[in-house]
Image (spheres, rainbow, N blue to C red):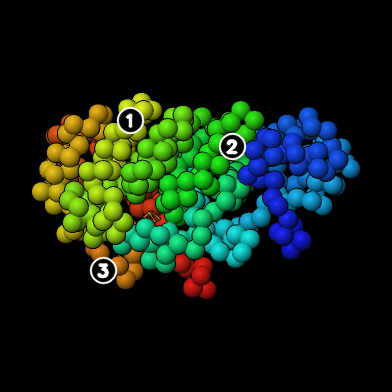
């Protein structure tokens, strides 16, 4: 990536009409817009030279007017549990994180939608530094190029199979960037990624959950609940003052009824804060009337300086058992989940400290 390239407009993030306009502006025929979309999104090619069915002159004109990748990988960490985390530097020097999770035949991309985050969750490294800025649709999509490159180092024909939008940032806070990226991800002329293989994970912004429900897609929705009373939740997630559990659960139900997609509730267990028997019973009661409730229990990953404790294994098991007895579908995400949740900014903190 050259300085000249970074000052240009990137083609990644453009829809098919915009790509066609770009091709015409570069002196090509309109039909080449489809070919360009196929190279970019269908094949995830990030070098004009590889776009062999575009004429040489057109490729040269495109390269002089537009850039492709504007971000670059600056760090890579392997967890040893099938997880690879990338530190990615954006065009303005900010750093975000993306994660590849390998699980049997699934290759899941966990992507970020913001640099930093405004939500301020106390158990999260990103929440400690505040929001730097929203990512553009193109910057969200560029993470797929970087993660696909990791997959293809291992298998030249490998493809990502699933997407979870739960890296740095609150996706629904960057609604335009998120929808711009998801539209291209899902489109026939784009990545052709089925909506049911995409999960949007939100801290719970009720109006935006309803807005997402009305977009006409069948994305999976995961809501980070983390508490069973508003008082407790506001202590962990300051934005809960405005949203409140009741409105979030109503919006989640609206999402289910509008899209017919199940909603998953994420619950980070924090030692002696929200992991008691009483919490488990309250959570079961809150979800009692919710159709087909799924709960992911995530034992907290310690964040330095947060003052929060990890739960004991015993409290995790007991919590899960109470929910199961109440008929809730429970999944405990132990080590992998804890590491993946660390997609929320811990690598970035280390890189920025350097
Ligand atoms: S947990 Fe998610 S919503 Fe909360 S501060 Fe971290 S990135 Fe933001």
Nearer the N terminus, badge 3 or badge 1?
1
Q: Is mark 3 within 8 Å of ligand 1?
A: no
Q: Which residue is mark 2?
A: 184
Q: Which residue is mark 3?
A: 307
Q: Is mark 2 within 8 Å of ligand 1?
A: no
**Mark 3 secondary-structure assignment:** loop
Give the side of residue 246 with respect to residue 52, left or right. Answer: left
**In this view, the mark in front (3 or 2):** 2
Pinpoint residue 54: horizontal percent, then vertical percent: 82, 36
Nearer the N terminus, badge 2 or badge 1?
2
- Residue lying farthest right? 57
Spatial CA span between label 3 and label 1 = 36 Å
Q: Residue at x 32, y 27 (%)?
A: 257
Occupied quadrant, residue 295: top left
Q: Which residue is mark 1?
A: 256
Which quarter of the figure is the N terminus placed in?
bottom right
**In this view, the mark in front (3 or 1):** 1
- Residue lying farthest bottom? 354
- Residue lying farthest left? 278
Spatial CA span between label 3 and label 2 = 41 Å
Q: Residue at x 25, y 64 (%)?
A: 308
């Amino acid at each position: 990536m050259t300085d000249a390239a970074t000052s240009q407009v990137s083609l990644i993030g453009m829809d098919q009409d915009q790509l066609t306009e770009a091709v015409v502006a570069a002196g090509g025929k309109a039909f080449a817009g489809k070919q360009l979309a196929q190279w970019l999104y269908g094949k995830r090619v990030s070098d004009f030279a590889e776009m062999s069915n575009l004429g040489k002159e057109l490729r040269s004109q495109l390269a002089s007017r537009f850039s492709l990748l504007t971000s670059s990988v600056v760090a890579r960490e392997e967890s040893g549990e099938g997880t690879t985390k990338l530190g990615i530097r954006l065009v303005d020097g900010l750093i975000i994180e993306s994660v590849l999770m390998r699980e049997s035949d699934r290759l899941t991309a966990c992507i970020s939608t913001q640099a930093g985050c405004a939500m301020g969750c106390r158990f999260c490294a990103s929440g400690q530094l505040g929001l730097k800025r929203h990512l553009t649709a193109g910057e969200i999509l560029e993470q797929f190029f970087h993660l696909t490159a990791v997959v293809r180092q291992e298998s030249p024909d490998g493809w990502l199979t699933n997407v979870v939008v739960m890296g740095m940032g609150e996706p629904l806070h960057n609604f335009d960037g998120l929808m711009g990226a998801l539209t291209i991800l899902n489109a026939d002329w784009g990545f052709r990624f089925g909506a049911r293989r995409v999960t949007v994970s939100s801290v719970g912004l009720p109006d935006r959950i309803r807005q997402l429900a009305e977009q006409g897609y069948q994305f999976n929705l995961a809501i980070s609940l983390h508490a069973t009373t508003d008082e407790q939740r506001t202590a962990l997630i300051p934005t809960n003052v405005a949203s409140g559990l009741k409105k979030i659960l109503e919006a989640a139900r609206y999402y289910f009824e509008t899209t017919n997609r199940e909603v998953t509730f994420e619950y980070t267990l924090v030692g002696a804060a929200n992991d008691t028997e009483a919490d488990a019973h309250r959570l079961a009661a809150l979800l009692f009337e919710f159709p087909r409730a799924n709960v992911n229990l995530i034992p907290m990953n310690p964040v330095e300086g947060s003052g929060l404790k990890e739960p004991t294994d015993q409290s995790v098991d007991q919590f899960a058992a109470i929910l199961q007895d109440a008929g809730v579908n429970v999944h405990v995400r132990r080590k992998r989940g804890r590491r993946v949740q660390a997609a929320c900014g811990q690598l970035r903190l280390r890189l920025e400290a350097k």
